[in-house]
Image: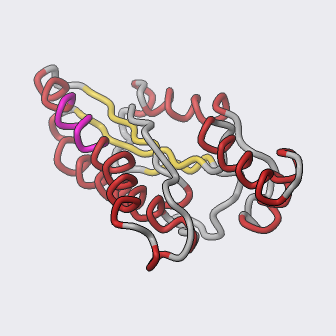
């Protein structure tokens, strides 16, 4: 399982620094490539394996002020499909889980920064963020790790032996479109 992710610099996509693009790309995307290079050959040798990448709602529903994160996570989602196509016949199933706004150190940091900038509590920062920035997140709260973990466990199990190249969203409804 690959869970690396940083939100990176935020703001106007054309004003992001080269360093911001490189940092997000290296952490959010290239680390996933490196994990695959290190582990998939061993899985192929054993004729069985599971790879699960944690992408994001942002991979399919980008937000303009989070361009560096959006792009890197979208690339990781695409890489998931490429890897699944290349290795399924060799016993390695590759899938993605795309959570949205889950309680984590990353989203804690986002909300702490928002609270400080707007002079409000973290609870207020979270509520206003949901109202202003995530209008489709119908459950109006941050997700919990324990709500994402069962999907990952399923994808790593024999129960998912006919699942590869898929992207499961655990997003509280935050993406405003259906997968087709």
- Give the mark count: 0
Q: Is 37 part of what is drawn in magenta?
A: yes
Please report the residue visible at 56 percent of the width from the left and 57 percent of the height from the top: 57
Say whether residue 118 is left or right of residue 175. right
Give the residue furthest to the bottom: 14
Please report the residue visible at 62 percent of the width from the left and 35 percent of the height from the top: 105
Q: Could you say which quadrant of the image residue 96 lies in?
A: top left
Classify the position of the N terminus by image quarter: top left
In the picture shown, does residue 83 fall above or below 2? below
Question: How is the protein colored in the picture?
Answer: secondary structure
Tell me the magenta residue range. Answer: 32-39
Report x, y in % for residue 131. 82, 64
- Dominant secondary structure of the residues highlighted in magenta in the image: helix
Say whether residue 6 is left or right of residue 107. left
Report x, y in % for residue 24. 39, 54
In the picture shown, does residue 76 fall above or below 32? below
Give the residue furthest to the top: 46
Report x, y in % for residue 139. 81, 52
Report x, y in % for residue 137. 74, 58
Q: Is 25 part of what is drawn in magenta?
A: no
């Amino acid at each position: 399982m690959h869970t690396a992710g940083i939100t990176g610099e935020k703001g106007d996509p054309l004003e992001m620094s080269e360093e911001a693009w490189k940092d997000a790309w290296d952490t959010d995307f290239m680390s996933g490539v490196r994990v695959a290079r290190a582990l998939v050959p061993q899985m192929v040798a054993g004729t069985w394996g599971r790879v699960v990448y944690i992408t994001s709602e942002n991979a399919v529903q980008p937000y303009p002020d989070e361009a560096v994160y959006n792009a890197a996570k979208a690339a990781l989602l695409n890489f998931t499909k490429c890897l699944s196509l290349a290795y399924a016949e060799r016993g390695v199933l590759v899938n993605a889980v795309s959570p949205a706004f889950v309680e984590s150190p990353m989203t804690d940091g986002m909300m702490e920064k928002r609270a400080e900038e707007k002079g409000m509590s973290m609870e207020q920062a979270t509520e206003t963020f949901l109202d202003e920035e995530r209008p489709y997140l119908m459950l109006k709260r941050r997700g919990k790790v324990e709500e994402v973990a069962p999907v990952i466990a399923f994808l790593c199990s024999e129960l998912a032996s006919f699942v590869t190249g898929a992207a499961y969203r655990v997003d509280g409804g935050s993406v405003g479109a259906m997968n087709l």
